[in-house]
Image (tube, rainbow, N blue to C red):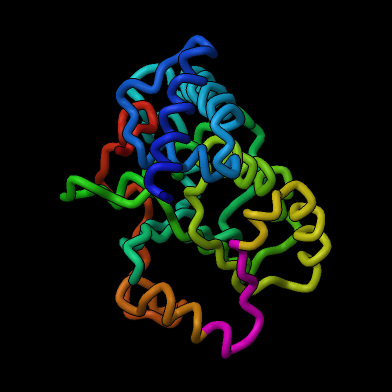
Amino acid sequence: MADATTDFALTKLKKSVENLGSSTQGYGDPTLMRFLIARSMDSDKAAKMFVQWQKWRATMVPNDGFISDSEVPDELETRKIFLQGLSKDKYPVMIVQASRHFPSKDQIQFKKFIVHLLDKTIASAFKGREVGNEKLIGVLDLQGISYKNVDARGLITGFQFLQSYYPECLAKCYILHMPWFFVSVWRFVSGFLDKATQEKIVIISNEEEKKLFVSEVGEDILPEEYGGRAKLVPIQEVEVRPPENGRTT
């Protein structure tokens, strides 16, 4: 019954997308299912979200289907993003070291950078395999940050991109080493997140939670400074070609 219901919802979604003047051709059912799940299996709402996503991708990534390193040089220069490989559950793990980040003066480049890192992180799960996983694990490390690193606008942009344009792509987001002065900032940022996103965010605040974090993600890919056995791998040193036009299946 569940399969029949899913098939019906997918068929209706495809028809609704056509009625909106677009097409789902070239996109696999797993990708379309993300939009359905994000809209509680409401085919019409999922179709509207899908078409908005297509228009957004066409505007944000108009040429080769991905944003190259050369388009986001300022953001890459700080070497603040690390791509560690796959977790125990086969989700790609991205680490953000916030102490290396400073609010961007070029918001267009920053938004392109968000797309660049999300596309590359997701694409890394497909390396060498026909089928990959569209979900990712994010680790936001706040250790050593000061007020000059605080960027509520940047955080809101990142999470809103995930919610609107990468539905059901966030498996979990761990926040480490949150200082006292950041609590009010996070409370403000959280106000822009939907309930589903908030439920995927875990703030690590004690040793027991840290042990669980290491266990869930995996010692083999977590760097030594986070309780694992690996080394940090800057995202620009990882070779992958993001799926064309955001298509992964």
Q: Residue 25 magenta-drawn?
A: no
Residue at horizontal 27 percent and vertical 37 percent from the top? 241
Which of 238 and 27 lies nearest the eye of the viewer? 27
Q: Is residue 41 left or right of residue 242?
A: right
In terms of depth relative to the viewer, which is nearer, 74 or 62? 62
Looking at the image, is 62 positioned above or below residue 68?
above
The one nearer the camera, 130 or 70, is 130
Q: In the rendered image, which quarter is residue 40 located in?
A: top right
What is the count of numbered marks? 0
- Residue 137 left/right relative to 86: right
> Taking 245 as reference, is 144 above or below it?
below
Residue 190 position in % (x across, y down): 75, 55
Q: Residue at x 83, y 62 (%)?
A: 184
Along the line of sight, which residue is nearer the eye, 149 or 33? 33
Residue for point 46% across, 60% down: 137
The residue positioned farthest toward the bottom in the image shown: 208
Location of residue 117 in the rendering, given as x and y in whole percent from the top left corner: 44, 44
Picture quarter containing residue 5? top left
On the image, the x and y values in percent for residue 58 come to 47, 18
**In the figure, is residue 175 to the left or right of 244?**
right
In the rendered image, residue 30, in percent from the top left (x then y), is placed at 36, 42
Which residue lies at the image location 52% right of the left edge and 19% below the top edge?
A: 55
Which image quadrant: the C terminus? top left
Q: Is residue 124 above or below residue 9?
A: below
Q: Which residues are magenta?
A: 200-210
Farthest front residue in view: 1
